[in-house]
Image (tube, rainbow, N blue to C red):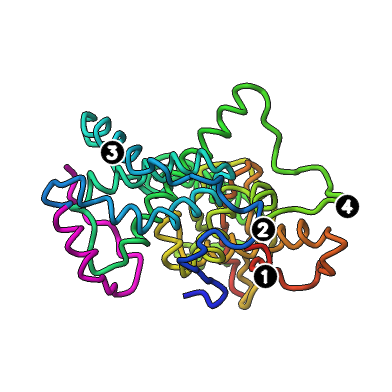
């Protein structure tokens, strides 16, 4: 087993005693002891996976894979950091892999269309899922992690594998795109020159 | 923590109906986790933890960066050679000509360009592929 530690992605964690006990028992080899940790963190991980993948079934499957991999590599978890953030890091990277494979499959099948979707009519109301699906994968990573799941630019950079500056550029480009997309909503009263308001859809 | 981030443990999926998971999404959830643990346990490295993309793409990025560096340096050397006088040429020996910072995809378009102080300038190219990456060419021009 690879025992290289994950890079720190969260400030000092304050883990409740029950959670720490469950982790210790899980580390000792008890799968059953891992169940409370799964129950506690599953909604957050599923939600993150859904924001990446846009499909609940796939999000559920990816969340299960995330927990399985986390269990098998618990020795690499650094307890100074948040367990939930560590899980989200694994989930985000797995989701990115899936998005990449999905895009490659579309290319192979000749269904791929470059990221320049048709103009959106004013009558079309975009949901968060639809708007996110129109971003590039890295823009989506930056927006989902920072704007929807509370990661700092530095934390998101650890997940994405780039610098904090790149995360800020990605968020800037994503916000501009989201502003175009969500700004097309006549009923929202949003204009293209207004700051984007991601929180309105969650 | 981003001030706009809010997570309600009692309602983790928000309030919009179209952003809710189907009812019963958590039924037998842990059974699925257990099955995946058992199947991945048989894999050589237990289904290793995913690494960030940058590490996976490091090799190809370095190759492309090296290629672009060589290409940019050659182009600028040729251009400068034609433009400078023999007296100026002596001063050019230690000058940084070009610096390229990572991209694996040479299919790029200009995203924005800017000149900054002391006649140095830089251009940011945006990848044309669906996944954005950047090539930054930092060209330090000759001193006045």
What's the residue at 21%, 54% (across, down)? A76
Marks 4, 1: nearer the viewer: 4
- Say left or right for A20 vs A63: left
Per the image, the residue denoted by label 2 is B83
Q: CA–CA distance between discs 3 and 4? A: 46 Å
Vertical position of residue A31 compared to residue A10: above or below: above
Magenta portion: prevailing SS class = loop
Of the two numbered discs 2 and 1 on the same chain, state the one appearing first in sequence: 2
Question: Which region is colored magenta?
Answer: A1-25
Q: Which chain carries label 4?
A: A
Helix, strand, or loop for circle 2? helix
Per the image, the residue denoted by label 1 is B115
Per the image, the residue denoted by label 4 is A123
Q: CA–CA distance between discs 2 and 1? A: 20 Å
Q: Could you confirm whether marks 2 and 4 are on the same chain? A: no
Q: CA–CA distance between discs 4 and 1? A: 42 Å
Badge 2 density bin: few <14, some 14–19, many ≥20, Cα 10 Å: few
What's the residue at 49%, 49% (across, down)? A49
Residue B127 x, y percent position in the rendering? 62, 47
Q: Which chain carries label 3?
A: B
Q: Mark 3 touching mark 4, by CB under 8 A? A: no
């Amino acid at each position: 087993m690879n025992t290289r530690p994950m890079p720190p992605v969260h400030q000092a964690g304050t883990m409740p005693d029950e959670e720490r006990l469950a982790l210790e028992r899980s580390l000792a080899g008890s799968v059953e002891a891992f169940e409370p940790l799964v129950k506690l963190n599953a909604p957050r991980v599923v939600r993150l996976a859904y924001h990446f993948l846009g499909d609940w079934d796939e999000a559920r499957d990816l969340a299960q894979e995330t927990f399985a991999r986390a269990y098998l590599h618990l020795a690499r978890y650094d307890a100074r950091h948040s367990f939930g953030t560590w899980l989200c890091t694994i989930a985000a990277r797995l989701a990115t892999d899936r998005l990449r494979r999905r895009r490659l499959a579309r290319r192979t099948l000749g269904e791929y269309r470059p990221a320049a979707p048709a103009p959106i009519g004013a009558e079309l109301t975009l949901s968060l899922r639809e708007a996110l699906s129109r971003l590039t994968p890295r823009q989506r990573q930056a927006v989902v992690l920072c704007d929807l799941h509370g990661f700092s630019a530095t934390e998101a950079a650890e997940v994405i594998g780039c610098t904090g500056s790149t995360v800020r550029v990605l968020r800037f480009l994503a916000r501009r795109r989201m502003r175009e997309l969500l700004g097309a909503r006549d009923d929202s009263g949003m204009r293209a020159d207004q700051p984007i308001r991601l929180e309105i859809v969650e | 923590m981003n001030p706009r981030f809010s997570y309600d443990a009692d309602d983790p999926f928000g309030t919009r109906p179209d952003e809710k998971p189907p009812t019963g999404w958590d039924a037998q959830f842990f059974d699925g986790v257990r099955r995946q643990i058992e199947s991945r346990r048989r894999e050589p490295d237990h289904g290793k933890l995913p690494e960030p993309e940058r590490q996976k793409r490091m090799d190809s990025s370095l190759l492309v960066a090296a290629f672009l560096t060589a290409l940019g340096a050659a182009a600028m050397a040729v251009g400068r050679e034609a433009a400078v006088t023999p007296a100026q040429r002596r001063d050019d020996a230690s000058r940084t000509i070009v610096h390229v910072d990572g991209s694996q995809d040479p299919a790029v378009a200009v995203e924005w360009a800017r000149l900054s102080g002391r006649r140095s300038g830089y251009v940011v190219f945006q990848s044309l592929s669906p996944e954005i990456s950047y090539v930054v060419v930092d060209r330090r021009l000759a001193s006045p």
